[in-house]
Image (cartoon, helix red, strand yellow):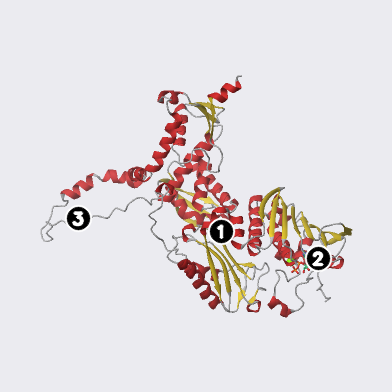
Amino acid sequence: MADIIQLLPDHVANQIAAGEVVQRPASVVKELLENAIDAGADSIKLIIKDAGKTLVQVIDNGKGMSHTDARLSFERHATSKIRNAEDLFQLHTKGFRGEALASIAAIAHVELKTKQPEDEVGNCLVIEGSNVVSQDVVVTPTGTSVSVKNLFFNIPARRNFLKSEAVELRHVIDELHRVALAHPNTAFAMYNNGSETFNLPISNYRQRIVNIFGIKTNEKLVPVEEDTEVVKIYGFIGKPEYAKKTRGEQYFFVNNRFIKSAYLNHAVASAFEGLLKNGTHASYFLNLSVNPQTIDINIHPTKTEIKFDDEHTLYALLRSAVKHSLGQFNIAPVLDFERDPNLDTPYSYKSSTANAPKIEVDRSFNPFKSEPKFSDRQMAAFKSTPNNWDSLYVGIESKENGSEQDFSEVHFESEEKAASMFQNDNEVETANTTYQLHNKYIVSTIKSGMLVIDQHRAHERVLYEEFLQNLTIHAVTSQQLLFPLQLHFSSQDISIVNQLKDDLEHTGFVFSNIEDGTVEITGVPVGVPESEVSIILEQLISDVENEVPDSNFSATDLLAKSMAKSLAIKTGQSLKKDEQEHLVNKLFACKEPNMSPTNRTTFVTMSVDELDKKFI
Ligand code: ADP
Ligand code: MG
């Protein structure tokens, strides 16, 4: 039989390799940013369009490439970073495989502009699907700019596989965070569809973290520092009280490379033992410097996992370093007598006192005396059972009395607010003067003039605060479904439902089964129509997927926001007089009536003066 084995042509081999290296726009971002770092740049710009699907461009001020190198850089296994196998164990660069540019050029339209500092002019190279279209001399600043357009243009299946823009953007931002956190000595700027999303000047490490995660992060950070022969540890951990429900802000860097390590994560988690609420995760930003000879980075194509020679020692050192910081900075919970209770969040049970269980002993009880079937007390208890049944079922009633005091401060405060707003407007007047405008706004008179409320946003605010309250105090109010509801989701979505299960149960959902793409629900929050359940869950899943991490991210908050968004009365819905009034009153009983949960204005006012001016 004739020989049948052939070598694959380069462009086919490159496309196959691209499958390993480039999964999505964020992979391109990672490779280009790392190349820019390796080129010694101290200022890097990332420009993307449509979350990177249309364009990913990275511009650096690094050392650039010569005419020949510019061409060679797109060859497979072409790298300036290692020369032989031994070099793999003394890596000081991010890249070393020499396949990123070749892979990217196999599946996109690439334009490279590059100039070395000593040269007058630079080179511009255009490559489309591994074919060099042109190479010209150009005038360009020192450094390199790589634009990657129309990713997967020649692999439609891969292109269709990409997620929504919000999801892809999130991955891109994650990659930027990882590189930017590892290199505070490099300035980064990111532009998405023409607007600036990040601007990170050269700074120290703490400032870099704060610039990325928001000013509020500053107070959360506790420094960690440990210098041993095996490893140098440097970075920050988040104080336990700021721990998150999701694992969002957990970063390990080994020799300035972002890595994932369940083992080291465990070391940190165990240092926090006893300090975290169940189900929450501490934040950390920890850099480990080790001798490059003691690690092997070469075990994963996208290089976020590495192998350490002596993991056990690292584990112990890391754990003790974190413990040490927690102790040194007095992180153990302390009683704070000077705290102003008004600043405390009202959404918790902090101020409630525990009711000590009463033990009553029936002193006259004689075990040898035969008793009538029910004692008087038992009889009385029996008679009162129906009430207990009620409270068992709803939970609202029984909660109301107890929680009233707990939230007295909120109610008081908001009553004042509402009162001052409506002061001197007699009740009747307010009650009679709500109008609905275009099934969208509720108009009412107030002391100073006129009030216009956006009905959807106002209701969103009301529901949001209600859900948040229920979620944090765990006051479950559930309504049993006659038949279990079965909903189908992708396995990725199922994992999100699983992640949120506890929180969802605190809103009143009851899950009887979650597995194999199916969620079975036997109870839903009171007031939620069965027909809305799948919409709510879908909305929630997409909100979780799309949530761009920010410093305020919390699963509870997101859940409350998402449910409020799904259930709030919609624009276009006509409201009866009493519904309008109810909404107005509820809104002004809120803690923050001015803004919707997504920070949009809920109402505007117009004073008589302003009106007068319009009639001049
Ligand atoms: P690797 O980074 O693994 O070496 P790449 O395919 O990413 O492989 O890059 C190939 C080569 O192209 C690099 O080794 C480097 O010499 C050169 N190169 C890539 N990007 C840049 C850049 N931004 N500035 C200077 N040289 C670069
Ligand atoms: Mg590279």
What is the C-alpha distance between the residues marked 2 and 3? 83 Å
What is the C-alpha distance between the residues marked 1 and 3? 49 Å
Label 2 is placed on what type of residue?
Phe
Above or below, comparing residue 405 to residue 3 in the picture: above
Label 1 is placed on what type of residue?
Gly
Sequence-wise, which precedes: disc 2 or disc 3? 2
Q: In the rendered structure, are the residues bearing label 1 and label 2 in contact, judged by CB atoms less than 8 Å apart?
A: no
Q: Around disc 2, counting alpha carbons within 10 Å, would you say few (fewer than 14), some (14 to 19), or many (20 or more)?
A: many
Residue carrying label 3: 360
Above or below, comparing residue 271 to residue 415 in the picture: below
Residue 251 falls left or right of residue 91: left
Q: Residue at x 44, y 33 (%)?
A: 418
On the image, the x and y values in percent for residue 502 come to: 46, 55
Q: In the rendered structure, are the residues bearing label 2 and label 3 in contact, judged by CB atoms less than 8 Å apart?
A: no
Foreground mark, 1 or 2, reads 1
Residue 318 falls left or right of residue 274: right
Q: Around disc 1, counting alpha carbons within 10 Å, would you say few (fewer than 14), some (14 to 19), or many (20 or more)?
A: some
Label 3 is placed on what type of residue?
Glu
Q: Quadrant of residue 228?
A: bottom right
Q: Residue at x 49, y 38 (%)?
A: 593
Image quadrant in which the N terminus is located: bottom right
Q: Is residue 519 visible?
A: yes
Q: Around disc 3, counting alpha carbons within 10 Å, would you say few (fewer than 14), some (14 to 19), or many (20 or more)?
A: few
Considering depth in this image, is 233 or 24 the residue closer to the camera? 233
Above or below, comparing residue 549 to residue 275 in the picture: above
Residue carrying label 2: 74
Image quadrant in which the C terminus is located: top right
Q: Is residue 529 visible?
A: no
Sequence-wise, which precedes: disc 1 or disc 2? 2
Please tell me whether mark 1 sits on a helix, a strand or a loop.
loop
Mark 2 C-beta to ligand 1 under 8 Å: yes
Residue carrying label 1: 248
